[in-house]
Image (cartoon, rainbow, N blue to C red):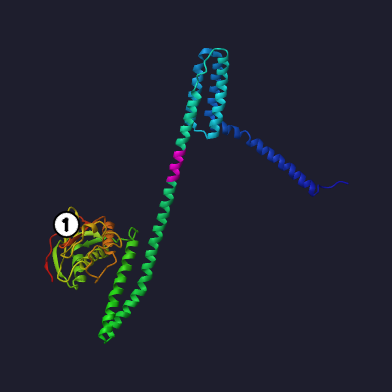
Amino acid sequence: MSGGPGIGGAEAAGGRGGIIRSGRLLMGRWPRRPLGWVRSSWVDIVWAVFVGVNLLGMREMGAWSTVPFLVIWVSLTLVYGLRMWRLQPAILTVAVVTLATGGIIVGQVVDGQQEADYLVALMFLAMVWHGRRRQAALLERLAAMEEVQRVSRENLRLLEQQQLFLVDASHELGTPITVALGHAELIEQSITDKMVAEDARVIIGELARLRRLSSRMLLLASVGSPGFLDLRPVGVDSVVMEALDRWGYAPRRWRLGEVVEATVPGDSDRLAVALDALLENAIAHTDKDDRIELSARVEDGHVILAVADSGCGIPEADMERIFGRFSRATPYRSREVGGFGLGLPTAAAIAEAHHGSVRVNSTVGKGSTFELLIPAGPAAANGNAGASGALG
């Protein structure tokens, strides 16, 4: 009785077919592997043939066998320098060459044709050891560089997290501070008790300081972002006069110095913040009878916004760190404004964003002069001086 193949027959057929296909696949791949090996190792193959020819020369040349002997070891040195084998292949190769050449030399010594004074193998082993030592040192340097890169990436990640934290914290602080400040101002305006009104004014002052702090944290965190500056032609005289209007209420002897009518490419809001920071710093380091002077001039292709005061000055030891974040110079006379050590870093960051800088000249007991340098526009060199004089 005949019938189609069962399950077992199908499996057997499939198995035979799989074997045949696998065999064909291996037959198709087998020639490729030796060819690939030959392509990648052709230098070693050529050198092995070269060594074989020179070994025959050593056997046939008798007293002149030193020449092919040296040629073999010199060629081995060159090939090792080109290939830099791993330790085990290097030892195996040296052992084979040593036995091959040494066997011929021993035979010739027995026959009285040569003297056993060949030390080339030891020299080659010393070269291998030196090469391995250099390779190990290179690997150590590479490992150290990878560690430095890893630490740099980690520091960059932490810096990005810090910037995100500052942005988030500034945004989160802004709303409750504004709400609390509004309620405190309402209390101050509606209360009749003088003591409560005075307490409300203290609260208003501290909340205003906190709002400035959060704003500066947000500004410093956003330095370098694409939308940090909105560059437009800015009139320097208007920036100076508006700053004087904002701060002229403070009980100081205010003076308006020379103010040029110049225009710079800049962000008027950011420049106002930078000038406010310099004025805030001047107020913090002066008393009521001290002088604060604002001026603007053109010098060496820059418009220079200057804030000069006759306050306590800055010690030389503090001059290098006052533009660092959360740093303050001593003595610090006033707590009316500021006090967080972010004002001068903010001014420096805004100046650098405008491709400018901030510099200071100070003498203890005589006062300080802070200057904000902004690259001038094409028309700034033709600017005219404005009015100047004492304001209070």
For the stretch drawn in magenta, what is the main secondary structure? helix
Q: Position of residue 48 (x, y in %)?
A: 55, 25
291 in relation to 143, above or below: below
Q: Is residue 325 visible?
A: yes
Residues shaded magenta: 136-144
Please give left or right for residue 56 compared with residue 190 in the image. Answer: right
- Residue 39: quarter of image: top right
Q: Is residue 331 magenta?
A: no
Instruction: Identify the element where label 1 is drawn.
Output: strand
Q: Position of residue 50 (x, y in %)?
A: 53, 22
Please give left or right for residue 63 compared with residue 301 in the image. Answer: right
For mark 1, what is the residue? 298
Label 1: few (<14), some (14–19) or many (≥20) C-alpha neighbours in 10 Å:
many
Please give left or right for residue 82 compared with residue 104 in the image. Answer: left
Q: Is residue 142 magenta?
A: yes
Identified at 21% across, 71% down, the residue is: 246
Q: Position of residue 183 (x, y in %)?
A: 32, 80
Q: Dividing the image into 4 quarters, which one contains the C terminus?
A: bottom left
Q: Position of residue 15 (x, y in %)?
A: 74, 44
191 in relation to 342, above or below: below
